[in-house]
Image (tube, coloured by chain):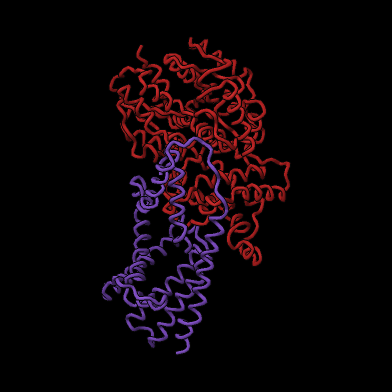
């Protein structure tokens, strides 16, 4: 199973409308917009120690050196040295740094999109403190402008920016949401004119795991939260972020920002979706160019706040053992480390931590759009074996996480490996244990 | 001895000029590129983020426990020869005299290590450099990401270290020639420095600081 419900006639193929010269020019222009001091320091600092490979699940699983994270930004490094580095004119004059070619960029598509989830574990191992994950993000942006983002991501990004839905669906998403309300007998407020909290949903849950959405609504209802979903800003995921399009990412974020402003929301609630959290919590304001007039909270963060305020009371569950997967974007890169544990603790969950946990957790290997790339599946499975083995090593009977993309990835891997566990939603567990 | 006079006279001065202006130029062209303003709501205050940044500058010198099984050996070798180099350059008596003569001052207190101890450190350092070089050539990741800069920097460093040891132990011919070779190697290092990865010595702390600050601002792992 992938998140994809729409098939592509030529998946993974490049946008054919650009010439090679245009591809290179566009990529270079995109790279140039990111030549700031922080980025330059990151690009200048690499000592080629190769340690970043030892943090990357793709390298660890395959031992193929091409998956070394810093190697994935080589075209960007080359562009910087040639166009903006301290000795750029010198390098150009003597031909020490050749121009990037369209062929090179095409070869990098797999490295930047199929074999990187932007999980950021490599950034934590670098002895120089290089933010490798951010460089890869910039690399993706150059690839998008060069027309080399995978079609599965680029087309969804365009569609989401235009319509709010990354894919066509027989039933519009707002109707799907209403149907979930009816099916699970839970009141799901939609398109209220004003509300303190505006909530979004993961598209993957709408299609694959509607019970998680019903659970979120159930908890919000039970805690008396004044909230609503909005038809025009329903989807939390941001395919512009996945595809590397700054422009489309901004457009998609602005859809949520505008709706939240319109209903005078003080909080935008990100559901169990990791990359949506990064896109909204940390990047939306930067793309908007101003502070947001509301706060952005992940649902586990919000529920932990309610718990602390005494507005959410939970039953203790029996001593069944759980492992918890820390989603990279929410925990490692987002800092929401204590909230899920506070919720589990309140329920008396017998938590069996993995050897690599919290900020150092291994990625699910599905995030960053990788779930959507059919051709990336064989590599993804190899990387996922690492994590499944870690979960098994805890001896836990059940497996929780707080990201829908991670759940999709683990479900798929579970089926592929005939694994005895399936990922469960932490919010669903909370909803099932609300103290009346 | 014209070659020795040349090495510690005009060549050294030229090398120092290239080094100083080259390093400054590389730093200026990076840190004056401009910084983005951050609009997202910070999880931690600016003061706490700055503290996190300062902590990251130091703590990143020691790998996180999760990574030690995979990187411990490489880090030990890398830091090992760097510590050796610093000890030799900053605490070896001939080098302390060299620095004081070069900059024309006499420090009231500059500790030195006994010559025999420095000699042992020198040999150990060369040994660690050899291990690092073998790893660079044999480890598939290191081999894949290495370039001319990596190897040329090592060649100069070897020339510097080996000529230094030869001078100390009186091997390789007339002392003045060996000493000249040692100083010429040093001059080449200074000239190569601003163009090479050796600049990491100047970038390491600002880069760690920036990452530490940005991660602390988000409350993220660092």
Q: How many marks?
A: 0
Residue A164: quadrant of the picture: top right
Who's red, chain-wise?
A: A
From this viewpoint, is residue B171 visible? yes
Residue at image location 40% in from the left, 39% down from the top: A359
Residue A207 appears anywhere in the view:
no
The colour of chain B is purple
Q: Residue at x 65, y 40 (%)?
A: A13
Depth check: give the residue in front, A422 or A267.
A267
Placement of B83 over or under A170, stated as above or below: below
Return the x and y of residue A413 as percentages of the image width and height.
46, 32
The vertical placement of A424 against A97, above or below, is above
User: Which quadrant: the C terminus of chain B?
Assistant: top left
When the figure is inspected, residue B177 is found, relative to residue A56, above or below; the finding is: below
User: Measured from the top left, where is residue A148 in percent x and y?
Assistant: 64, 43
Q: Give the image quarter of residue B76.
A: bottom left
Quick one: quadrant of the N terminus of chain B? bottom left
Which residue is rendered at x = 52% and y = 45% of the image?
A134
Q: Residue furthest bottom?
A: B1
For residue B46, side relative to residue A161 (left or right): left
Q: Position of residue A278 (x, y in %)?
A: 51, 35
């Amino acid at each position: 199973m992938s998140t994809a419900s729409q098939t592509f006639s030529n998946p993974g193929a490049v946008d054919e409308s650009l010439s090679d010269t245009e591809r290179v020019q566009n990529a270079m222009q995109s790279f140039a917009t990111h030549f700031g001091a922080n980025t330059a320091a990151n690009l200048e600092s690499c000592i080629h120690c190769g340690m970043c490979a030892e943090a990357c699940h793709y390298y660890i699983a395959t031992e193929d050196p091409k998956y070394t994270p810093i190697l994935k930004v080589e075209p960007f490094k080359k562009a910087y040295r040639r166009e903006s580095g301290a000795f750029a004119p010198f390098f150009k004059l003597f031909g020490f740094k050749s121009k990037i070619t369209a062929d090179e960029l095409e070869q990098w598509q797999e490295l930047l999109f199929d074999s990187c989830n932007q999980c950021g574990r490599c950034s934590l191992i670098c002895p120089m403190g290089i933010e490798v994950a951010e460089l890869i993000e910039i690399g993706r942006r150059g690839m998008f402008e060069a027309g080399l983002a995978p079609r599965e991501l680029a087309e969804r990004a365009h569609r989401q920016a235009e319509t709010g839905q990354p894919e066509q669906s027989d039933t519009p998403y707002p109707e799907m949401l209403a149907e979930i309300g009816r099916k699970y007998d839970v009141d799901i407020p939609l398109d209220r004119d004003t509300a303190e909290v505006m909530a979004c949903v993961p598209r993957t849950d709408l299609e694959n795991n509607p019970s998680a959405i019903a659970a979120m609504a159930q908890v919000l209802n039970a805690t008396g939260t004044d909230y609503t979903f909005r038809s025009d800003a329903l989807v939390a995921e941001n395919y512009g972020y996945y595809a590397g399009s700054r422009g489309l990412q901004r457009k998609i974020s602005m859809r949520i920002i505008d709706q939240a402003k319109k209903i005078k929301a003080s909080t935008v609630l990100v559901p169990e979706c990791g990359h949506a959290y990064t896109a909204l919590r940390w990047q939306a304001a930067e793309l908007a160019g101003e502070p947001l007039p509301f706060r952005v909270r992940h649902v586990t963060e919000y529920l932990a706040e309610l718990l602390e305020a005494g507005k959410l009371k939970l039953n203790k569950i029996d001593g069944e053992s759980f492992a918890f997967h820390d989603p990279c974007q929410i925990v490692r890169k987002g800092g929401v480390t204590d909230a899920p544990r506070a919720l589990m603790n309140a329920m008396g969950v017998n938590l069996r931590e993995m050897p690599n946990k919290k900020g150092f957790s291994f990625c699910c290997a599905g995030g960053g759009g990788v779930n959507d790339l059919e051709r990336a599946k064989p590599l993804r499975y190899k990387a996922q074996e690492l994590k499944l083995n870690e979960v098994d090593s805890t001896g836990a009977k059940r497996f929780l996480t707080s990201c829908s993309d991670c759940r999709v990835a683990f479900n798929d891997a579970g089926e592929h490996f005939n694994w005895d566990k399936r990922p469960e939603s932490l919010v669903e567990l909370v909803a099932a244990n609300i103290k009346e | 001895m014209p070659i020795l006079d040349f090495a510690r006279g005009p060549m050294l001065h030229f090398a120092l000029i290239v080094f100083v202006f080259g390093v400054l130029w590389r730093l200026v062209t990076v840190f004056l590129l401009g910084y983005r303003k951050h609009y997202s709501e910070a999880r931690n205050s600016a003061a706490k983020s700055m503290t996190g940044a300062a902590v990251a500058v130091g703590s990143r010198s020691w790998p996180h426990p999760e990574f030690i099984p995979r990187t411990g050996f490489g880090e030990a070798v890398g830091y090992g020869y760097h510590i050796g180099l610093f000890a030799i350059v900053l605490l070896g008596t001939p080098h302390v005299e060299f620095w004081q003569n070069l900059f024309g001052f006499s420090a009231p207190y500059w500790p030195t290590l006994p010559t025999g101890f420095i000699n042992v450190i020198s040999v150990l350092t060369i040994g660690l450099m050899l291990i690092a070089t073998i790893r660079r050539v044999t480890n598939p990741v290191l081999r894949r990401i290495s370039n001319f800069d990596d190897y040329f920097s090592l060649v100069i460093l070897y020339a510097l270290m080996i000529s230094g040891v030869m001078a100390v132990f009186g091997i390789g011919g007339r002392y003045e020639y060996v000493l000249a070779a040692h100083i010429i190697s040093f001059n080449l290092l200074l000239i190569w420095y601003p163009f090479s990865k050796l600049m990491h010595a100047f970038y390491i702390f600002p880069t760690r600081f920036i990452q530490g600050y940005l991660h602390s601002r988000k409350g993220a792992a660092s």
